[in-house]
Amino acid sequence: MPEHRLSTAPATRPWTWIPTLYFAQGLPYVVVMTLAVVLYKNLGVSNTEIALLTSWLYLPWVIKPLWGPLVDLLGTKRRWIWALQFAIGAALAAVGLAVPGPGFLQATLVLFWLMAFASATHDIAADGFYMLALPQRTQAAFVGVRSTCYRLAMIAGQGGLVWLAGWWAARHGSVAQAWAMVFFALALFFGLVGAWHSVALPKPAGDRPVPRSAHFWSDFATVFAAFFRKPEIGRILAFLLLYRFAEAQLLKLVTPFLLDPLAAGGLGLTTQDVGIAYGTVGITALTLGGLLGGWVISRAGLKRCLWPLMLCMHLPNTVFVALAVWQPQSLVLVSAAVALEQFGYGFGFTAYLVYMMMVAGGADGSAVHKTAHYALCTGFMALGMMLPGMWAGWLQTQLGYLNFFVWACVATLPSFAAAALLRIDPAFGRKAD
């Protein structure tokens, strides 16, 4: 009787844990991918080092399908979630201690690396737990809630926390101490959310370790082999790796460009201004673009929408060319320009996400191993961001901001070439009439 209560009652109150779970899932990714860039820029690290070193932090998301089965084999997903949240909190507190020190770059990189592995593993556990803890109809009903809470984490981290770091630095006069306070606040949040989830997460009957089969590792290899035996796998991989080839380079240099002084070709914004323009206005526009892109694809299908969405994603890169030429000092104008670029990015990126669903599930959605194959797609997505981003800082240093942004526009051409080779079912992604 108690087991029955555990497996069914919590599913009726998903509002008590879904928002906090997916807000907590988004924050570590923002910390590693965005806050680290702003932190290092504020502390005087060069653009070359920032782009190279922070791009390596994508690696855990690239290779997470390799250890995903361990989450099924060892312990419950519920326990993985709150234990990893405590681990992320400890890593954040350690970053706060390391930032003011003389060897901050090496120490924080190690800690960010560990945090990235914990965050990637947390993604696996949280998404698996979501499917176990809720009936299928409730899962569908809360997809929008998940996405919204994840986006709110991006706004809170990339917008609110960046603004807070700038405000504390202006108030206390020490950039390093300001960032240390930000990371201590984050550590406290993860301690509290880990404690909350250790109590509030439901205990579904299906959340138990999967018995290890004698053929487990051979079955594991079979799942991988099936992915690489998909028809036209070369075209699929080319598209997954090249769709964001330009954006991967651009994103690494947006924050340094906004922060660098006018004499260096930047816009000379304060850290607080960047939190508003890029972290709040920009991410809000990104979210709205994603919502609209999903609706458009649902109406017309992926095949008809792919090229228009790609154009909407890549053409706004010219906004940064204009910003580099005119170097406007109006925060309102800069925010509007960033919002335009981010809206286009969010709008066009939905085509990429829907294409990954098609690859993982097959045109009719009936393919086996779709969860594992989708994880592999996300791994290639992360690899497509990691590799181009690594050289972006060096390239910008050689070219200057204006020529670098011109290059970012030219670098969109490989994605169009890869898209031209795809074969997509005209009905895929479109809702039935």
Image (cartoon, rainbow, N blue to C red):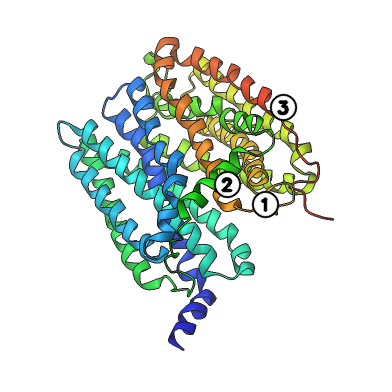
Residue type marked 2: His
Q: Please report whichever mark, 1 or 3, sits nearer to the chain's N-terminal start.
A: 1
Residue underneath mark 1:
367
Q: How many marks?
A: 3
Question: Is residue 40 at all visible to an observer of this figure?
Answer: yes
For the C terminus, give its image quadrant: bottom right
Residue type marked 3: Leu
Q: Nearer the viewer, residue 41 or 378?
A: 378
Q: Answer above or below: position of 138 versus 359.
A: below
Left or right: 140, with 399 as reference point: right
Residue type marked 1: Ala
Q: CA distance from mark 1 to mark 3?
A: 22 Å
Among the 4 quarters of the image, the one containing residue 399: top left
Image mark for residue 421: 3
Q: Nearer the viewer, residue 221 or 6?
A: 221
Question: Residue 334: x, y in percent?
Answer: 51, 29
- Identify the residue at image location x=39%, y=26%: 256
Are the residues flagged by discs 2 and 1 in contact, CB closer than 8 Å? Answer: yes
Would you call the spot at circle 1 few (<14 residues within 10 Å), some (14-19), or many (20 or more)?
A: some
Question: Residue 255: x, y in percent?
Answer: 42, 29
